[in-house]
């Protein structure tokens, strides 16, 4: 059946870049989006920021240390389970290398990328940097390199300060919507999908008509 390509479909994805469930949801959603785009659909994915650990250190610390504090003896079992889930999705999740860090700067870069039409590429690179490469995505020099890799132009110092204020306001706005955990995906059908759903569920959701108006 031919796809309805008359209008651009809208998807809002609330995420945090150190959230493994956000990474899984992103990977599956992107695959569903690409399948719909291959059928001729126009889909715009917008990322909304959320921080699962706003108290995380700006300088970063080994994720394994945080896991031990939060989960104790269960940490190793949990990490092995999630690594296996990731592997089934084709993702390399190196929790032992990850640097647990405050994601404010990373969200600011993702917002800049979204404004330049490179949000999806930037989200993928930031997730991979954190979970696979063991990079500190709170470090300005690291973010500069990732931006260059992805073709994102960084803002000047004055604009950077404004971007920080805008991100603070956006984080508060998202919280004000009642979001308390991620991932959360809102579609123009009126549907909201929480947690890391399957690729097929995302595909079905994207195949439903958008709300009129």
Image: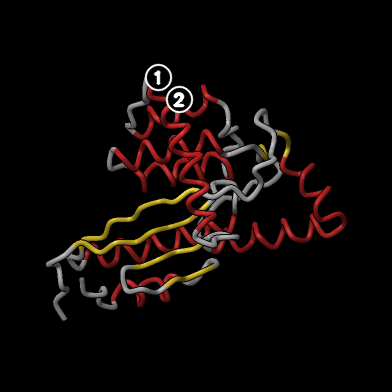
Neighbours of disc 2 within 10 Å: few (<14), some (14-19), many (20+): few
Secondary structure under tag 2 reads helix
Q: Write down the quadrant of residue 115 in the picture.
A: top left
Residue at numbered disc 2 = 161
Camera-nearest residue between 105 and 65: 105
Q: Quadrant of the C terminus?
A: bottom left
The residue located at (20%, 61%) in the rendering is: 8
Q: In what quadrant of the picture does the N terminus appear? A: bottom left
Along the line of sight, which residue is nearer the eye, 131 or 88? 131
* Residue found farthest to the right: 73
150 to the left or right of 184: left
Kindly identify which numbered label has been placed on residue 158: 1
* Rendering coords of residue 12 (x, y %): 38, 59
Check whether the beta carbons of the residues at disc 1 and disc 2 lie within 8 A of each other: yes
3D distance between C-alphas at marks 1 and 2: 5 Å
In the rendered image, residue 178, in percent from the top left (x then y), is placed at 54, 62
Q: Position of residue 79 (x, y in %)?
A: 72, 56
| 18 is higher (above) or lower (below) than 36 | above
């Amino acid at each position: 059946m031919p796809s309805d390509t008359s209008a651009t479909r809208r998807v809002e994805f609330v995420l945090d870049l150190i959230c493994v469930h956000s990474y899984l949801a992103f990977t599956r959603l992107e695959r569903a989006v690409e399948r719909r785009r291959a059928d001729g659909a126009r889909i715009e994915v917008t990322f909304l920021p959320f921080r699962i650990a706003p108290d995380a250190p700006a300088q970063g610390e080994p994720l394994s240390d945080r896991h031990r504090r939060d989960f104790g003896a269960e940490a190793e079992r949990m990490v092995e389970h999630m690594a296996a889930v990731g592997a089934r999705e084709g993702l390399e999740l190196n929790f032992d290398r990850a640097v647990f860090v405050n994601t404010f700067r990373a969200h600011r870069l993702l917002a800049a990328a979204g404004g330049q039409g490179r949000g999806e590429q930037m989200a993928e690179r930031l997730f991979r940097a954190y979970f696979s490469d063991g990079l500190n995505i709170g470090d300005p020099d690291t973010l500069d390199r990732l931006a260059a890799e992805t073709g994102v132009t960084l803002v000047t110092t004055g604009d950077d300060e404004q971007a920080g204020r805008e991100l603070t306001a956006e984080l508060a706005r998202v919280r004000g919507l009642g979001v308390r955990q991620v991932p959360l995906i809102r579609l123009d059908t009126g549907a909201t999908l929480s947690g890391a759903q399957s690729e097929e569920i995302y595909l079905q959701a994207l195949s439903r008509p958008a709300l009129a108006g």
